[in-house]
């Protein structure tokens, strides 16, 4: 009888141990997974640095340009001292405008050199204290008179985002993305066949139709936008 009782007790202990092991196993596995995820996140964060030198401004601004053209682009913009300067000379068809370190977020642009008179005129008017509406009206009049010109099809590449940390190995800014502006002065929805609002992510549409600043917009949009 004692042998039977002893066997039953021993069996109960084994069942209890096995049940305990099964309960602990998922917890241990989950802990390992969480640790691996945290480690990966920390590695990514270690790769990022603040844009705090002129060299950083140049490197990140060039991400707005086509990859094959970056090495020869001219770079202009505000340096870390707050001066608007030529940050790097170039000898191809592109001019790159660096992010303004005194403004929130990140915004760099790349455009064909033929657009520089139009862009420079806008900068000069804003420096005079003109409002956005005033800048628009002045350049509209100057385009109509022939004082300013925009070659239809001239493209502006904009690299932008809410954050200002970047990976110095790749020059990519955290969370930044590209949108494109194709200038088509005086174009309309009727003349181009494009809608005046985007219908899907990266769907081209026409903005400022019928004006000197009419342009085709191609912007990344949230896939779930209604």
Image (tube, grey):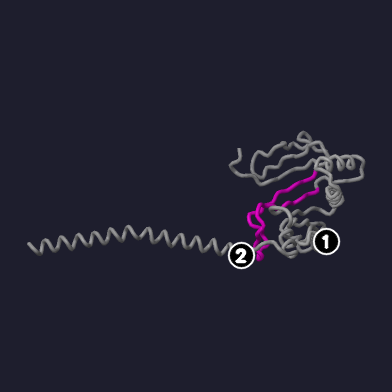
Image quarter in which the C terminus is found: top right
Determine which quarter of the picture holds residue 89.
bottom right
Q: Residues within 10 Å of mark 2 (few under 14, many from 20)?
A: few
Label 1 sits on residue: 86
Q: CA distance from mark 2 to mark 1?
A: 29 Å
Please state which of residues 179 and 47 is positioned toward the viewer in this rendering: 47
Label 2 residue SS: helix
Along the viewing direction, whichever of 46 and 113 lies nearer the viewer: 46
Q: Position of residue 54 (x, y in %)?
A: 75, 64
Q: Horizontal and vertical percent for residue 65?
A: 74, 57
The stretch drawn in magenta includes residue 201:
no
Farthest residue toward the top?
Answer: 190
Vertical position of residue 189 compared to residue 46: above or below: above
Residue 15 drawn at (x, y percent): 23, 59
Q: Residue at x 61, y 40 (%)?
A: 225
Residue 79 at x, y = what percent? 78, 61
| Residues drawn in magenta | 154-183
Precedes in sequence: disc 2 or disc 1? 2
Quadrant position of the N terminus in the picture:
bottom left
Q: Is residue 56 left or right of residue 112?
A: left
Q: Quadrant of residue 43?
A: bottom right
Relative placement, left or right, of 4 versus 134 is left
Q: On the image, numbered disc 2 is attached to which residue? A: 47
């Amino acid at each position: 009888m004692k042998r039977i009782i002893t066997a039953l007790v021993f069996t109960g202990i084994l069942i209890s141990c096995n049940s305990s092991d099964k309960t602990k196993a998922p917890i241990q596995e989950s802990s390992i997974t969480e640790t691996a995820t945290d480690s990966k996140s920390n590695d990514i964060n270690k790769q990022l640095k603040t844009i705090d030198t002129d060299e950083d401004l140049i490197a990140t601004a060039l991400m707005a340009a086509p990859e094959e053209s970056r090495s020869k682009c001219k770079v202009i913009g505000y340096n870390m001292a707050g001066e608007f300067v030529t940050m790097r000379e170039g000898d191809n068809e592109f001019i790159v405008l660096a992010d303004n370190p005194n403004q929130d977020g990140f915004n760099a642009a790349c455009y064909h050199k033929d657009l520089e008179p139009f862009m420079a005129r806008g900068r000069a008017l804003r420096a005079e204290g003109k409002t956005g509406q005033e800048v628009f009206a002045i350049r509209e009049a100057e385009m109509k008179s022939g004082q300013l010109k925009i070659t239809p099809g001239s493209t502006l590449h904009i690299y932008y985002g809410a954050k200002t940390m970047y990976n110095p190995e790749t020059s990519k800014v955290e969370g930044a993305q590209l949108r494109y502006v194709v200038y088509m002065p005086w174009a309309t929805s009727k003349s181009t066949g494009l809608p005046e609002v985007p219908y899907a992510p990266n769907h081209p549409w026409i903005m400022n139709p019928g004006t000197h600043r009419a342009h085709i917009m191609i912007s990344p949009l949230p896939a779930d936008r209604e």
